[in-house]
Image: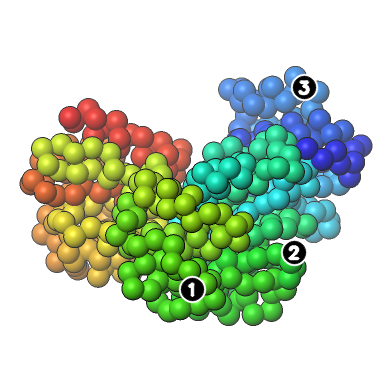
């Protein structure tokens, strides 16, 4: 870990705890900052806040009072999930105080270079694949970000022999100043998180921020089939390495049912075990990235012929009486569910629903037309049922939650059917995380068996 002095003796506000806020506060305290912690949850039952207070940090809990600015605040490190219309954030910006996220601090203390992966869909699969291949090639990767441990924790353990393979959200990328990955990866950009960002323009700008500090000595692996990405990168001062499923490019592409990189054949598609056509984009992005790190084709082939997916992303759970159950709880938006449904040729019974962000599900309609049935739950149940009726689905049922959906789906199914949890919505109306939702689904399947 690099020893940095820029926060020593400074009053640094850490806004919001959870894993990233807690880790950020601990590191800042360790490097000599005067840490003030502010968390919405009351002190009673807030074990993280009590632990930080015991370490000598000032802790303000139970709300976000503006009186916190009665003392000088030099920098704010914000939990990525806290929106910019939070009164503390708005006040800090009005006062000209920098508002950062923990990925900025991770970069500042890291001795290792970063590979940063972002996009509306496919981040976790691509991050995992890149990490697995680099590990297979003995290049000492460490995985961090939205997957696994928070970046600020991993960065403290890294040295110059490591590579930090980091999944990054738009929320995190809005809070950077100097963060500069050696390789950035932008998989796709489509309408998402507008309840947080406000406009599609601001959302896209947050994604492309991953490149803003890169130079021509760095690389950006981008989706050449995404017109918005190609438009946004025109003025970026970085070496572009494209990937495409539809045409030959100076990067990674498909030809004759095989994956190529710069005219070099890597692997035939039918050797790849990861299910779903949509995963070809993730695989192409992965190949382009690891080839920039001079990984051997043997390492790429070894992983692609054995990697079956990550937990909660089209994860095969169990086969019961010739019905196959898949957990795609990480499908928190419409595009992810479109791609999940498209991955199967069998009859599909879809389990969907969750947090209502105000959107309709019209974009899902063409994909629902081939479903056998749909089971809904959560705040969006009624909206999804309307779209299902418009798609001509005759079997539509509503249940209270994911756990109750599993036996109902089994009763509706026949041999050869696929029962797919792919909610098309965030989980926060009923569950703390999409992981919790997925684990409940998995447990319900095992209980059914």
Residues under numbered marks 1 and 2 in contact, where contact means CB atoms less than 8 Å apart? no
Tell me if I can see residue 441 in this picture: yes
Considering depth in this image, is 324 or 304 the residue closer to the camera? 304
Tell me if I can see residue 89 in this picture: no
The answer to whether 53 appears left or right of 448 in the picture is right
Q: Which residue is mark 1?
A: 263
Considering depth in this image, is 184 or 438 the residue closer to the camera? 184
Q: Secondary structure at mark 1?
A: loop
Q: Earlier in the sequence, mark 1 or mark 2?
A: 2
Label 3 environment density (alpha carbons within 10 Å; few <14, some 14–19, many ≥20): few
Q: Residue at x 22, y 27 (%)?
A: 447
Q: Secondary structure at mark 3?
A: loop
Residues under numbered marks 2 and 3 in contact, where contact means CB atoms less than 8 Å apart? no
Q: Residue at x 55, y 46 (%)?
A: 137
The answer to whether 34 appears left or right of 144 in the picture is right
**Where is residue 86 shown, x and y percent of the image?**
66, 51
Quadrant (top left, top right, bottom left, bottom right) of the C terminus:
top left
Q: Residue at x 43, y 79 (%)?
A: 247
Label 1 environment density (alpha carbons within 10 Å; few <14, some 14–19, many ≥20): some
Q: Earlier in the sequence, mark 1 or mark 3?
A: 3
Q: Earlier in the sequence, mark 2 or mark 3?
A: 3
Q: Nearer the viewer, mark 1 or mark 2?
A: 1
**Image color mode:** rainbow
Alpha carbon distance from label 1 to label 2: 30 Å
**Where is residue 146 shown, x and y percent of the image?**
55, 45
**Where is residue 385 shown, x and y percent of the image?**
23, 58
Quadrant (top left, top right, bottom left, bottom right) of the N terminus:
top right
Q: Is residue 34 above or below residue 120?
A: above
Q: Which residue is mark 2?
A: 213
Q: Which residue is mark 3?
A: 55
């Amino acid at each position: 870990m690099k020893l940095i002095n820029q926060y020593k003796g400074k009053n640094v506000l850490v806004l919001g705890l959870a894993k990233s806020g807690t880790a950020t506060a601990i590191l800042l305290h360790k490097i000599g900052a005067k840490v003030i912690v502010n968390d919405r949850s009351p002190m009673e039952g807030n074990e993280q806040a009590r632990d930080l207070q015991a370490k000598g940090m000032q802790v303000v809990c139970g709300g976000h009072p503006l009186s916190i600015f009665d003392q000088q605040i030099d920098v704010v490190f914000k939990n990525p999930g806290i929106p910019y219309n939070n009164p503390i954030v708005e006040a800090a910006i009005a006062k000209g105080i920098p508002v950062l996220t923990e990925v900025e601090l991770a970069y500042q203390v890291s001795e290792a270079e970063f590979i940063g992966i972002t996009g509306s869909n496919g981040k976790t699969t691509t991050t995992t694949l890149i990490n697995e291949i680099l590990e297979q090639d003995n290049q000492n990767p460490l995985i961090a970000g939205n997957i696994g441990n928070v970046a600020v924790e991993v960065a403290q353990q890294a040295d110059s022999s490591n590579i930090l393979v980091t999944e990054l959200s738009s929320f995190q990328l809005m809070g950077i100043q100097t963060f500069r990955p050696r390789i950035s990866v932008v998989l796709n950009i489509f309408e998402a998180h507008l309840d947080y960002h406000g406009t599609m323009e601001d959302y896209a700008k947050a994604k492309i921020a991953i490149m803003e500090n890169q130079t021509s000595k760095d690389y950006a692996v981008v989706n050449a089939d995404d017109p918005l990405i190609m438009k946004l990168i025109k003025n970026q001062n970085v070496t572009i390495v494209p990937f495409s499923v539809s045409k030959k490019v100076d990067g990674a592409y498909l030809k004759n049912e095989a994956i190529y990189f710069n005219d070099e054949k890597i692997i035939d598609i039918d050797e790849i075990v990861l299910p779903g056509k949509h995963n070809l984009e993730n695989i192409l992005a992965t190949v382009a990235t690891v080839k920039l790190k001079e990984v051997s084709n043997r390492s790429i082939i070894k992983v692609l012929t054995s990697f079956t997916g990550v937990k909660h992303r089209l994860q095969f759970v169990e086969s019961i009486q010739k019905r196959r159950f898949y957990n795609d709880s990480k499908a928190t938006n419409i595009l992810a569910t479109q791609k999940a449904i498209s991955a199967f040729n069998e009859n599909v019974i879809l389990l969907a629903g969750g947090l209502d962000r105000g959107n309709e599900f019209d974009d899902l309609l063409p994909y629902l037309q081939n479903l056998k049935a749909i089971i809904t739950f959560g705040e969006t149940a009624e909206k999804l049922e309307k779209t299902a009726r418009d798609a001509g689905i005759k079997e539509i049922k509503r249940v209270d939650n994911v756990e109750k959906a599993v036996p109902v789906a089994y009763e509706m199914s026949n041999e050869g059917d696929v029962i797919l949890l792919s909610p098309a919505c965030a989980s926060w109306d009923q569950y703390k995380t999409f992981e919790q939702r997925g684990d409940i689904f998995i447990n319900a399947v095992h209980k059914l068996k």
